[in-house]
Image (cartoon, grey):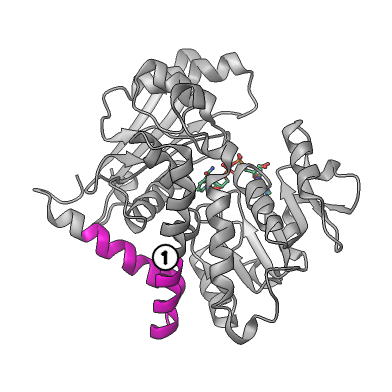
Amino acid sequence: MEAIFQFADELGPAKVVHVHEPSINLKAVLVVDNVAAGPALGGVRLAPDVTAEECFRLARAMTLKNAAAGLPHGGGKVVLYGDPKMPPAQKERLIRALANALRHEQDYIFAPDMGTDEHCMAWVKDEIGRVAGLPAELGGIPLDEIGATGWGLAHVTEVALQYCGYFCDFKLEKARVVIQGFGAVGKHTARFLAAKKALLVGASDSRGAVYHPDGLAVEELIRLKEAGQSVVDYPQGEKFDRDAAIDFDCHIWIPAARPDVVNEANVDRLKAKLVVQGANIPFTEGAERHLHEKGVLCVPDFIANAGGVICAAMEYRGAVQAAVFEAIIDKVCRNTRLVLDESKTKKILPREAAMTLALQRLKRAMAWKRWSIF
Ligand code: NAD
């Protein structure tokens, strides 16, 4: 009883659902955090080492992200235990079963996250219909294929550079960028930043890291990843263990993988002057505060990486792809300016300013409710 309520506060979670079907080894947790603004929109994360705690924290991140982006959705998340590289037939069975188990959880709309994609969402659509992030053939806007989140992150990076102050002795053109986690978010961010003439010097994935001071060819790295290889199969550059990406010399560091990769124990190794958080909760609170005190600007996850959920929310309402890119720029750049202006004026962490922005919007939505969070 106490363990499950240790994450409960005045914002949520409204509901926690444990999903278990031993015959197919289905184990998952759904956390519906706060649905004051509308049904929770947040992805299904499939990984062997996910935890219920990660699910609580990610669901909250979605509540804040959706509120900050002004979307009519609350926050929620599912973690599903399993190897994302399992055979497709096994994955299909698990996802279909998960969708059925959550058939009556009207407060939760399925969407993709690490380990799941639009194919998985197509199975959910077939089973229960309540889903975003579908393939184009089913009316979806394939957010990972078009790079909705990376599109937003590249624009946020450009805006954030104007706030690096005296510390900013570089321009986006030729800025040295490292991407930690060269997956759906990471590779598109690299692609959009390369189009703005930034130089990708380092990248990592679950199998290792590559660094080349003269730059890596982004399209070639993407081709390798799409062929099922790793960034360490890139022919040039020096190869390292995956955790070495934190040591790479760069101006801009973009985390795009798992939570807490930068923490109190390793934060001093980070060389960057600007961090734009592509992953959800990639830094611990202490690490972020430490960087702020050192003058390193960190744009918080739920402001910077909202492109994907903006795309999913628009798809859910029948929008077309062309409208999505404009809407993402509009929302993420406006929020980045609001947060960084407030942080500068009040001398507070960008995350504190971002929390204030999200909470103002969330609390207005909560005030309309008979109860509060649901
Ligand atoms: P993905 O599965 O496509 O890519 C993740 C990448 O990270 C993979 O290349 C994987 O090999 C790598 N990785 C895993 N563990 C690693 C480690 N310890 N060190 C280095 N690399 C590692 O997932 P994604 O959709 O790109 O999501 C990445 C992050 O961005 C997640 O935190 C996700 O919640 C967040 N996010 C995604 C979206 C989206 O639109 N997909 C939107 C907002 C936030």
Residue under the image location 64 percent in, 53 percent down: 192
Q: Which residue is mark 1?
A: 334
- How far across and how far down the image is residue 77, in percent? 40, 40
Q: How many marks?
A: 1
Residue furthest out toward the front? 322
Residue under the image location 28 percent in, 63 percent down: 359
Residue furthest out toward the left? 370
Q: Quadrant of residue 221?
A: top right
Residue under the image location 69 percent in, 74 percent down: 171
Asked whether 115 or 122 is in front, the reply is 122
Instruction: Identify whether 374 is placed above or below 137.
Output: below
Asked whether 118 or 115 is in front, the reply is 118
Residue under the image location 53 percent in, 46 percent down: 148
Residue furthest out toward the right? 236
Instruction: Identify whether 358 is placed above or below 306.
Output: below
Lateral position of residue 61 relative to residue 50, left or right: left
- Start-end of magenta stretch: 334-363
229 magenta-colored? no
Q: Amino acid at mark 1?
A: Arg
Q: Quadrant of the N terminus?
A: top left
Helix, strand or loop: magenta stretch: helix
Q: Quadrant of residue 292?
A: bottom right
- Helix, strand or loop at label 1? It is helix
348 magenta-colored? yes
Lateral position of residue 24 relative to residue 362, left or right: right
- How far across and how far down the image is residue 276, in percent? 57, 63
Instruction: Identify whether 141 is placed above or below 129.
Output: below
Q: Is residue 157 visible?
A: yes
Q: Is residue 135 visible?
A: no
How crowded pointer 1 is (Cα within 10 Å; few <14, some 14-19, many 20+) is rated as: some
- How far across and how far down the image is residue 364, in percent? 19, 60
Asked whether 77 or 363 is in front, the reply is 363
